[in-house]
Every structure is written in structure tokens, then in C-alpha cells.
């Protein structure tokens, strides 16, 4: 599967639309493009709601635990109008017949679904005749916990919403499954088997009964569950028949920080990085810096895996490594410059927040004597760090976008315990240098925000530390930072319950591959599957010596490409493109509640009281060009001021 690299048509160009005149006499029913989610506190409904929200699909939620909730009656589901008018295009229920929903409410819901051909998704079902399945018995079916297994999509699934999936869906992680035997009217969409392989049957399917369609899932999941996340795009398309507001993509960019610099090295057993935080009693350890062979390996890996790595560089590292002479590392990078993306990481990686006082351990912000005000790195220093590295890139011929910036340690931005606020000079410096996208640490500040004329681009850390280049260093550092005191770690993980079992240190390579790689790859893949355009980042030591980054990336890419066909390619955004997508997603999330949209007589109408860019998804059979094909549908952003119409959508 190829990785789509050029996104500007999607992100910045006006989506081509098929404009149609208002029908002289709209005779067909009108269905509003919103989904009704009926919640009872179950994690499965939470996961479905999260998938709809990630996709940008407008929803209304009825909380069955709320004694003051509005009843689900005809007035809640339809609008008195000149033609039949449904408020919702689809319905999500906790199960086929939640006990908290009165029989009369369920009956009117079914009537409206039948009248308007609305689909219903039951977040979790048991195998009963009412759900179209015979209960498991000693001779057929199975129920229990499944630690690992492979479920398989059927041809019926790929023909209705899941056509961009290859077919195999890993199921496991202590998942409860119930496999029943299909009865009349039930069409399996996903099948699985008991642990011994002797019993096989549906884990997901559609029951067609009384002119209605209900899709039920008979396995457990929760928000963040990857089997469900893998199925989420298809579930949204099945539920909405491929016509809805919102759109979904798979994004994955990886930034490599500190390129050209040497990094301090972790000292196994001493639990510190020499040159950074080791006491004087720790013997010196050599710094870590890429070699020309590492550059060739990175370029070859990128080519072989069809995946671009973005290198965030510090020009001072090259000047210090070879003062007055040619730097072999820089020469190798220049020879391979077209294999990578390039990002300004400031000239020398100087900390650009407060002035650090290292007499305290850990460091603290220096203050003005007597007055006690925090001392900040001056704005002119920030200007110089940014401008000198841009000048270096132009001098040597590195193709950068000068409006993008990664500061050293994300410094200058709030986030550290000692830095609750931005450096007051940061916004002015960014504006002076024309910076429009500046990296932030998503583990400290996940949301995008403006800083002067720039916008932050939160980045997810891949937890391979800047000071580790070998399997042994990585395992030792990981165990120290992520395990309890009882297991030999520093115990910081105990404050949030995030401790993990220690990685066996006897064979560091085996332990790294068996425990750390799956853990980090699973986290990154979770972001990819969640329509999250925020980049990931590591540091240049992960590309040298034991080259620890590649196994993580290979598992992410391999897992994604095993799930989806080329119809749903992995997109690699630049920082600017990530900033654009994040801004559009946030603006749409704020406007979705007040934006109106409906389908009537094969025409989608989107209406807004104030100008807003609206994401719209339609079937691939739409007459004319709209957006771009992705997955099983076409989608794009439409600027809406007043009303905008798209024609050719099948009713």
C-alpha cells in the first residue's frame, strides 16, 4: 500500500461540488444528517459515539440514566412539515431493546426507522432469537474470553461499508465474545472462532426484519479498543449509508529531532544521562550522533517502506562537529536530501523558556533579585536561534518550509512545571521570523492554540528516549521510567497507575522487541486509527547504533496495511498540513451543533448561519466530481455561507 504524500489539494483547495438548483417541488421525504445516540453508560456506546465524533458526524445523545430525559417519541424523531421529515439519519442503541427504553418508545423508534429507511446500530448484543442468532449450545456456537484470534470480514461486509478492508481483523486482549448461529434474516459481517478453532460464527452482523436493518456487535470493546477502531470507518459508512457530514482519514507523520547534534547517552545502571543529569561520580559516556551509514540506512528504509521521515535539524551541530572542515554527516544528508522532509529545530537547541538556574536540583527558573520576577530568555535570542538555522538551511541547500519550527525541548511554550506560561517574547519572535506552525508536546498540551500569528502542532512522543541508542540502554531507561519502585524503577509511574511490568534485561534485544515495540506501536496505531493528524516524534539516536525506531514503525505500518487496502492510504502530513487539519477539525467541532444538513430527492443541502468549512462524505457514485475518493466514499471540505447543495446522491 502506498503512502500518500501530497495533501494540499485536500487541505487547501476548494472542493469541487456539483451545484444543483433548488427542486421546483421537493416531493420526497427529508432526512436530517444527524445521528441519534441512546446511551446507558456502556463502554461500547461510548466507543461508537467516539468514532462518530472523530469522524465529525453530528450527534444528539439521549442519556437513559437521566430521569429528566426527553422521551423518545415521534416528536423527538420527526418534524411536522409539508413532507415527511426525520430529525435523524440513523440511530445507535446500547442493545437491541434496552430495558431503560419503554416498549412504546422502542415501537415508535422502529416505526420511524421503517418509514425513513433509517439504520440502527446495536452497540452490544447477546445471541438470542430477537437479535437473529441462536444461543450458543454444546453443539453449536461458543462464548467466553478470547485472548487472541483473527476475525474475518465477509463478502457481505465488504459490499456494504467495509470494502476498503482486506478482511482480517485481530481480536484479543481479553475480549468477551459470543458466537451464535445465524437465523433467518441475519447476515454475518464479521466471523470469529473459539480459541480451539472448533466453533466459528458471527461476531457482527445485520438482522433484517419488518422492513428494518439492525447491525449488532457480539464482542466487548471500549474507547481505544483497536479491533473496534479498525472497524469504525466501515461502521460509520454502514450506519449512514455513506452520506453524512464529517470525514475520516488515517494520518501518520514521524519527526526525528536533534539531527546533526550529538545527544547525551544514558548510563545503564546509573539511571541518568551523562552530560545531562548524571552526578560527577558517573564515568564519562560517549555522546550519540548519527553517521553517514545511518543516513543511507534511513533513506533505504524510507524507500523500501514507502514512508517519509521528517528530520528536525540543528545546524550548530554540524559546525561544532567539524569546525572549519566538511562534516561527513552533513554531506551524507545533503546527498540524500530528497529522501526526507526537513524542519527547522533552531540553530543550537538552546532552551528558550525561562533562564534556568542549575544550582537547584532539579533546575528551576531564575528570578530577578528582590523583585522575584521570572527571568526569561530574551526575544532577540529566540529570533537568532530561528533565523540562524533558516540561514544555515539556505546556505547548504536543505529544502525547508521556513514557516515551520520545532524549538528545543518544545521550549518557550508553557508545559514544564516551572513554565506555566509561555515565554512572553515567544509570540513576537515567531511573528518576526514568519513562523506559522510551531511544535508542542501533545503529552503536555494536546489541543492546538494560537501563539501570535502561529498555531501549535501538538506532537505525540514515541517513548524511546533521546539518550538511548542501543537495546540495552533503551531497556534500562524504560524499566527505570516505567516500572514501580518494587520492580526497580523510579516509581513516578505509581502516581497515575501507569506502571508496566519490567522488560527482562538478560536479552535486551529480545525484551525490546517483545515488550517495548508492541507497546509503543499500539499507542501510535491508536492515533492513526482515530483520525488524529498530530505528528509523532523521537530523536536521532533512534536512527543510529541499534536503530531502535525501525521495529516500532514497521509494526505500525505493517498492522495498518494488513487492515486496509490501497483505497484507504496512510497520509503523511507536513507540519503545516497537520496545523491546517487540526484547525479545520476544531472549527468544525465548534460549528457542527449549529450547522444544518439534510438529504432530500437525492440532493444534500448544507446550511449555516455563519461561514464555515464543512466536511461532507458522499457515495462514490455521486454524479460529477466532489472532494476526493478515500475509503469506500468521496469526501471533502465545502465552504458554506448560507446554503450549499450537492446533487446526485442516491436516496
Image (tube, rainbow, N blue to C red):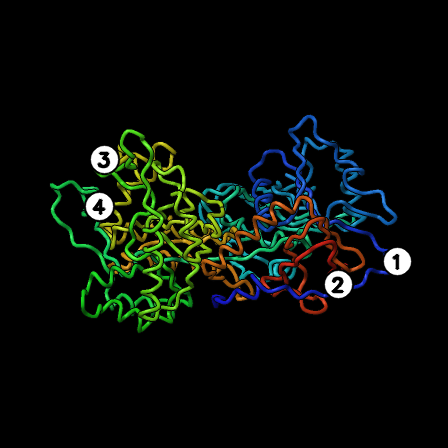
Q: Which of marks 1 and 4 is nearer the N terminus?
A: 1
Of all residues, the one furthest to the top in this rendering is 67
Would you name the residue on which mark 4 appears? 276
Q: Label 3, label 2: how many angstroms apart (C-alpha)?
A: 66 Å
- Report crowding for label 1: few under 14, some 14 to 19, many 20 or more residues within 10 A (C-alpha): few
Regarding mark 4 in the picture, which secondary structure is present there?
Answer: loop
Question: Could you tell me which residue is drawn at 63 percent across and 51 percent down?
Answer: 205
Camera-side mark, 1 or 4:
4
- Report crowding for label 2: few under 14, some 14 to 19, many 20 or more residues within 10 A (C-alpha): many
Question: Could you tell me which residue is drawn at 65 percent across and 50 percent down?
Answer: 182
Q: Mark 1 and 4 residues: CB-CB less than 8 Å, in contact?
A: no
Q: In this view, does 309 lie above or below 80?
A: below
Residue 25 has which mark?
1
Would you name the residue on which mark 3 appears? 361
Q: Earlier in the sequence, mark 3 or mark 2?
A: 3
The answer to which of 320 and 585 lies nearer the viewer is 320
The answer to which of 274 and 238 lies nearer the viewer is 274
Give percent across and percent down for residue 284: 13, 49
Q: Earlier in the sequence, mark 4 or mark 2?
A: 4
Residue 647 has which mark?
2
Regarding mark 1 in the picture, which secondary structure is present there?
Answer: loop
Camera-side mark, 3 or 2:
3
Q: Is residue 205 left or right of residue 326?
A: right
- Residue 190 visible somewhere in the drawing: yes
Give percent across and percent down for residue 491: 29, 34
The answer to which of 650 and 635 lies nearer the viewer is 635
Q: Earlier in the sequence, mark 3 or mark 1?
A: 1
Regarding mark 3 in the picture, which secondary structure is present there?
Answer: loop
Q: Label 3, label 1: how many angstroms apart (C-alpha)?
A: 76 Å
Amino acid at each position: 500500500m502506498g503512502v500518500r504524500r501530497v495533501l494540499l489539494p485536500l487541505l487547501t483547495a476548494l472542493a469541487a461540488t456539483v451545484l444543483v438548483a433548488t427542486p421546483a417541488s421537493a416531493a420526497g421525504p427529508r432526512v436530517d444528517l444527524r445521528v441519534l445516540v441512546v446511551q446507558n453508560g456502556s463502554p461500547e456506546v461510548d466507543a461508537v459515539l467516539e468514532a462518530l465524533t472523530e469522524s465529525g458526524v453530528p450527534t444528539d445523545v439521549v442519556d437513559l440514566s437521566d430521569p429528566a430525559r426527553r422521551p423518545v417519541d415521534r416528536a423527538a424523531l420527526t418534524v411536522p412539515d409539508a413532507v415527511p421529515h426525520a430529525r435523524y439519519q440513523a440511530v445507535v442503541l446500547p442493545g437491541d431493546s434496552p430495558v431503560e427504553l419503554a416498549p412504546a418508545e422502542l415501537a415508535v423508534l422502529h416505526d420511524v426507522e421503517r418509514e425513513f429507511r433509517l439504520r440502527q446500530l446495536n452497540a452490544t448484543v447477546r445471541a438470542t432469537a430477537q437479535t437473529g442468532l441462536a444461543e450458543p449450545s454444546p453443539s453449536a456456537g461458543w462464548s467466553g474470553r478470547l485472548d487472541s484470534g483473527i476475525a474475518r470480514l465477509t463478502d457481505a461486509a465488504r459490499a456494504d461499508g467495509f470494502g476498503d478492508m482486506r478482511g482480517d481483523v485481530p481480536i484479543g486482549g481479553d475480549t468477551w465474545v459470543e458466537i451464535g448461529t445465524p437465523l433467518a434474516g441475519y447476515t454475518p459481517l464479521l466471523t470469529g472462532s473459539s480459541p480451539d478453532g472448533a466453533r466459528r460464527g458471527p461476531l457482527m452482523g445485520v438482522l433484517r426484519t419488518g422492513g428494518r436493518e439492525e447491525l449488532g456487535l457480539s464482542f466487548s470493546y471500549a474507547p481505544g479498543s483497536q479491533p473496534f477502531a479498525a472497524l469504525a470507518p466501515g461502521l460509520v459508512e454502514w450506519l449512514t449509508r455513506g452520506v453524512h457530514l464529517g470525514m475520516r482519514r488515517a494520518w501518520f507523520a514521524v519527526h526525528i529531532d536533534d539531527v546533526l547534534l550529538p545527544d547525551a547517552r544514558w548510563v545503564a545502571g546509573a539511571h541518568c544521562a551523562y552530560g545531562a543529569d548524571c552526578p560527577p561520580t558517573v564515568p564519562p559516556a560517549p555522546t550519540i550522533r548519527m553517521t553517514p551509514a545511518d543516513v543511507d540506512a534511513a533513506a533505504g528504509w524510507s524507500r523500501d517502506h514507502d514512508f517519509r521521515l521528517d528530520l528536525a535539524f540543528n545546524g550548530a551541530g554540524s559546525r561544532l562537529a567539524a569546525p572549519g572542515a566538511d562534516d561527513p554527516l552533513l554531506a551524507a544528508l545533503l546527498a540524500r536530501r530528497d529522501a526526507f522532509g526537513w524542519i527547522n529545530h533552531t540553530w543550537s537547541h538552546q532552551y528558550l523558556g525561562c533562564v534556568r538556574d542549575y544550582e537547584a536540583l532539579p533546575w528551576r527558573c531564575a528570578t530577578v533579585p528582590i523583585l522575584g520576577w521570572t527571568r526569561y530568555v530574551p526575544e532577540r535570542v529566540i529570533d537568532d536561534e530561528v533565523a540562524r538555522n533558516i540561514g544555515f538551511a539556505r546556505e547548504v541547500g536543505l529544502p525547508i518550509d521556513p514557516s515551520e519550527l520545532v524549538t528545543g525541548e518544545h521550549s518557550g511554550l508553557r508545559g514544564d512545571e516551572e513554565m506555566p506560561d509561555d515565554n512572553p517574547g515567544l509570540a513576537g519572535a515567531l511573528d518576526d521570523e514568519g513562523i506559522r506552525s510551531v511544535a508542542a508536546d501533545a503529552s503536555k498540551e494536546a489541543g492546538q492554540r494560537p501563539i501570535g500569528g502561529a498555531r501549535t502542532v501538538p506532537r505525540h512522543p514515541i517513548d524511546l528516549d533521546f539518550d538511548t541508542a542501543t537495546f540495552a540502554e533503551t531497556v534500562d531507561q524504560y524499566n527505570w521510567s516505567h516500572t514501580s519502585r518494587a520492580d526497580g524503577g523510579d516509581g513516578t509511574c505509581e502516581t497515575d497507575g501507569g506502571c508496566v511490568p519490567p522488560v527482562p534485561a538478560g536479552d535486551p534485544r529480545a525484551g525490546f522487541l517483545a515488550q517495548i515495540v508492541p507497546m509503543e506501536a499500539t499507542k501510535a496505531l491508536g492515533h492513526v486509527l482515530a483520525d488524529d493528524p498530530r505528528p509523532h516524534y523521537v530523536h536521532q539516536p533512534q536512527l543510529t547504533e541499534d536503530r531502535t525506531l525501525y521495529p516500532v514503525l514497521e509494526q505500525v505500518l505493517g498492522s495498518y496495511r494488513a487492515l486496509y487496502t490501497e483505497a484507504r492510504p496512510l497520509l503523511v502530513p507536513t507540519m503545516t498540513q497537520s496545523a491546517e487539519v487540526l484547525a479545520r477539525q476544531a472549527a468544525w467541532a465548534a460549528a457542527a451543533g449549529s450547522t444544518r444538513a439534510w438529504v432530500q430527492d437525492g440532493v444534500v443541502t448544507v446550511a449555516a448561519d455563519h461561514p464555515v468549512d464543512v466536511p461532507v462524505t458522499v457515495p462514490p457514485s455521486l454524479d460529477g466530481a466532489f472532494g476526493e475518493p478515500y475509503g469506500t466514499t468521496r469526501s471533502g471540505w465545502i465552504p458554506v455561507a448560507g446554503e450549499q447543495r450537492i446533487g446526485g446522491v442516491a436516496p
